[in-house]
Amino acid sequence: MRRLALFFLLSISFEAPAASAQNVEARKNGIITNYVTKGSLEATRNIGCIKIAKAKSDFTPPDLLKGMIACVRRNDYETAGYLYYLARIYAAFDSLRVSDVSARQAGTVLLIQTYEELQEDQKTRLSEMLDKIMGTPELEKRLCGDLQKVGMPTYHPKYMILHGMGAFFGASAEGGLVEDFDGASNWKQLLGSLKDCPG
């Protein structure tokens, strides 16, 4: 029965909506074809391996994770770890402010895709560094200070909006935000999720 169900699922052919077909691209992964909106989860710039102190509030999570990969390839796992946490909290902030509920898991998908670029030993070393940052009071305090200095995001979360079903079916990525969203309050609450980080 399971084999029959799997065969049925793999046999389904999906056609992108005609209204937005020019904005949809097919990405094949073996026998699976994923249809994505162009611009979904894409970086807007190549920032390289930079210290978190040099990060800017208009760097998107895709930008920051691309920088994290660059740091891993240079064996600079501490810098990679700080960029990871900045990307993660920015993605969490974006998931609160985008109005398309189906787009809000973009941050998780982005992290999964980024991890797939790493080799197993790199994944292990990065995970160990992430645990060390959160498990060492002085390092977590430093992260808190760095996050406060960079500040809440100032970019439009197009990368996330384009990941949602609304954009897939032709909705514009220029809007897509929750009305009357209180950025300052939500940013402070996210920072407060870190130990001893007042936001």
Image (cartoon, grey):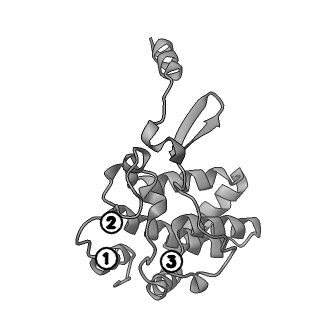
- Amino acid under disc 3: Asp
Say whether marks 1 and 2 touch (CB < 8 Å). yes
Foreground residue among 77 and 29: 29
Splitting the image into 4 quarters, where does residue 130 fall?
A: bottom right
Circle 1 packing at 10 Å, graded few (<14), some (14-19), many (20+), is: some
Q: Quadrant of the N terminus?
A: top left
Circle 2 packing at 10 Å, graded few (<14), some (14-19), many (20+), is: many
Tell me which label, 3 or 2, sits earlier in the chain: 3
Element assignment for label 2: helix
User: Residue at horizontal 63%, vertical 70%?
Assistant: 45
Tell me which label, 1 or 3, sits earlier in the chain: 3
Element assignment for label 3: loop
Say whether marks 1 and 3 touch (CB < 8 Å). no
Name the residue carrying label 1: 183
Answer with left or right where residue 24 lies relative to residue 120.
Answer: left
List x then y, in percent, for residue 71: 70, 70
Circle 3 packing at 10 Å, graded few (<14), some (14-19), many (20+), is: some
Foreground residue among 98 and 110: 98
Foreground residue among 121 and 183: 183
Splitting the image into 4 quarters, where does residue 53 fall?
A: bottom right
Name the residue carrying label 3: 58
Q: Which mark is residue 99?
A: none
Depicted 88 relative to depicted 51: above or below = above
Q: Quadrant of the C terminus?
A: bottom left
Tell me which label, 1 or 2, sits earlier in the chain: 2
Element assignment for label 1: helix
- Amino acid under disc 1: Gly
Name the residue carrying label 2: 97
List x then y, in percent, for residue 61: 52, 66
Question: Alpha-carbon distance for marks 1 and 2?
Answer: 8 Å
